[in-house]
Image (cartoon, rainbow, N blue to C red):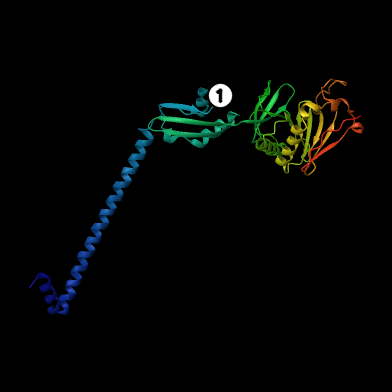
Amino acid sequence: MSKEQRKRKKARTASPADRQADAASAQRRSGKRRRRRGNNILWYLLILVFMVTTTIVLTTTVFFKIEQITVTGSEHYNDRSLILSSGILLEENMFRLNDGEIKKKLIEEYSYIAQVKIHRRLPDTIVLEIKEAQPIGAIDAGAGYTLISEEGRVLECNTPVLPEGIPVVMGFSEETPAEGSYLEQTDSENVQRLSVLLNAIEETGFPYFDVIDLSDPYNLKLYYGDLFEIVLGTQANLEYKMELVQEVIETQDLVNTFRGTIDASYDGEVWTRPSGSVSVPGTQQPESGQEDGSDAAQSSSSSSDGLEETSQTEEETAQPEQEE
């Protein structure tokens, strides 16, 4: 007879008192095992807490000290100035840096800085990744140009030379804001209009402008040298309006044959009104009788009574009329 069979036989023949005693003994043994298991878990937890605490202390005091600081992405400021302004010190622990404070400090101090990312290159290098804002327009302040970003921040003041590809923008209420400041609320709406207008220009590849006039939000205008005053109306359907204007200019060779107003403020139509020449409001007017090489402009009066009008619709292209 096997051992297991003997146990079952003994259990069947044991008295109720014996069975009760055996059950109590088994319960005591089970309780001891649970207590031992609980004590072991507690010790494991204490050891784990000790190891984590030791690792944190060593990480923030002994290891990962900064030995090198590098800067990437900065075009307007030298690396040394940015590092000094950040407040990051050599031999400082890289994991004790306050990233938010460093970013805020650099952005507030340097007008061109739009975003800062801090990278930790183990074991000992900090990398400051700088993203600079790009100017989208310039305000003519008389003594120089004030460059503004897409966020409406003043990037630079009194710039003597207008950067290539940056249009002069009219219509801002504050002509001489402080560098690093943001344009006032009234001007921030113009910044939004400017962004929409420039996006439409980029999408269509529209090249015929160097001055943008935002003075009237319901009558946006572009100026192209002393050749064209382009009236766009509101900012609705700007891409479509620009495509029509560009078609008129190129199919009728208006760059060589016309000076005056091109009006695309009417839905699906482009009207041309020739004049002797075009001047941006607020600038010096050209002398009367100036030669411009344009037959249409020469044969037209500069007053509103003598202007001729031609129109371009979606279906047809009309050649500019000339006075007999």
Tag 1: residue type?
Answer: Tyr
Could you tell me residue 145's position as x and y percent?
A: 70, 25
User: Quadrant of the rendered structure where residue 290 is?
Assistant: top right
Q: Is residue 188 above or below residue 38?
A: above
User: Quadrant of the rendered structure where residue 62 is?
Assistant: top left
Closer-to-camera residue (74/258): 258
Quadrant containing the N terminus is bottom left
Taking the spot 25% from the left edge, 59% from the top edge, the residue there is 35
**Residue 114 showing in the rendered view:** yes
Left or right: where does residue 121 sit relative to residue 50?
right
Could you tell me residue 261's position as x and y percent?
A: 82, 33
Could you tell me residue 167's position as x and y percent?
A: 70, 29
Q: Is residue 21 above or below residue 261?
A: below
Q: Residue furthest left?
A: 1
Taking the spot 19% from the left edge, 72% from the top edge, the residue there is 23
Closer-to-camera residue (23/117): 117
Left or right: where does residue 155 sit relative to residue 229?
left
Taking the spot 75% from the left edge, 33% from the top edge, the residue there is 251
Taking the spot 49% from the left edge, 27% from the top edge, the residue there is 71
Element type at marker 1? loop
Left or right: where does residue 293 sit relative to residue 182?
right
Query: Which residue is disc 1 drawn over?
Result: 77
Closer-to-camera residue (226/296): 296
Badge 1 local density, few (<14 within 10 Å), some, or many (20+)?
few
Closer-to-camera residue (110/36): 110
Could you tell me residue 45's position as x and y percent?
A: 31, 50
**Figure disc tally:** 1
Quadrant containing the C terminus is top right
**Residue 171 showing in the rendered view:** no
